[in-house]
Image: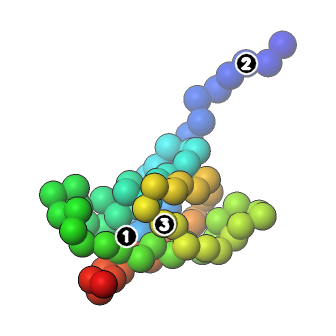
């Protein structure tokens, strides 16, 4: 018999600031909002989101709008504003 235990949050780092996040996935918008709290009010601004220390098969990558990635303890995200095209 297996019991389902609540998963404890993991610590992720967004632009040098540590955040606790529920174990599971984080979306592009959620990462950007951690760094830029008023992101939702400025949809015209786009951001580049890169991550390191990700899950085994994808330890590094770029998170694009609409996408999400599995989080793990100590994962690092870099968020930078991109120029308008």
Left or right: residue 66 compared with residue 54: left
Q: x%, y% of residue 31?
A: 40, 61
Residue position for label 1? 17
Give the camera-side residue of 66 and 59.
66
Of pointers 1 and 3, the one earlier in the residue sequence: 1
Left or right: residue 49 compared with residue 8: left
Quadrant in the picture for the N terminus = top right
Q: Is residue 42 visible?
A: yes
Element marked by disc 2: loop
- Distance, label 1 to label 2, CA atoms, is 34 Å
Element marked by disc 3: loop
Give the camera-side residue of 12 and 37.
37
Q: What residue is rendered at 69% in x and 70% in y?
A: 59
Numbered label attached to residue 7: none
Q: x%, y% of residue 42?
A: 18, 64
Residue position for label 2? 3
Residue 78 vertical placement versus 36 (above, below): below
Of tags 1 and 3, the one toward the viewer is: 3
Residue 29 vertical placement versus 50 (above, below): above
- Distance, label 3 to label 2, CA atoms, is 36 Å
Of tags 3 and 2, the one toward the viewer is: 3
Of pointers 1 and 2, the one earlier in the residue sequence: 2
Q: x%, y% of residue 58?
A: 71, 67
Element marked by disc 1: strand
Numbered label attached to residue 64: 3
């Amino acid at each position: 018999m297996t019991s389902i235990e609540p998963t404890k949050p993991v610590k992720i780092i967004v632009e040098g600031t540590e955040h606790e996040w529920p174990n599971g996935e984080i979306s592009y918008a959620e990462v950007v909002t951690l760094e830029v709290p008023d992101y939702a009010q400025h949809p015209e601004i786009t951001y580049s989101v890169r991550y390191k220390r990700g899950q085994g098969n994808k330890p590094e990558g770029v998170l694009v709008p609409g996408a999400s990635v599995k989080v793990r303890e100590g994962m690092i995200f870099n968020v930078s504003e991109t120029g308008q095209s």
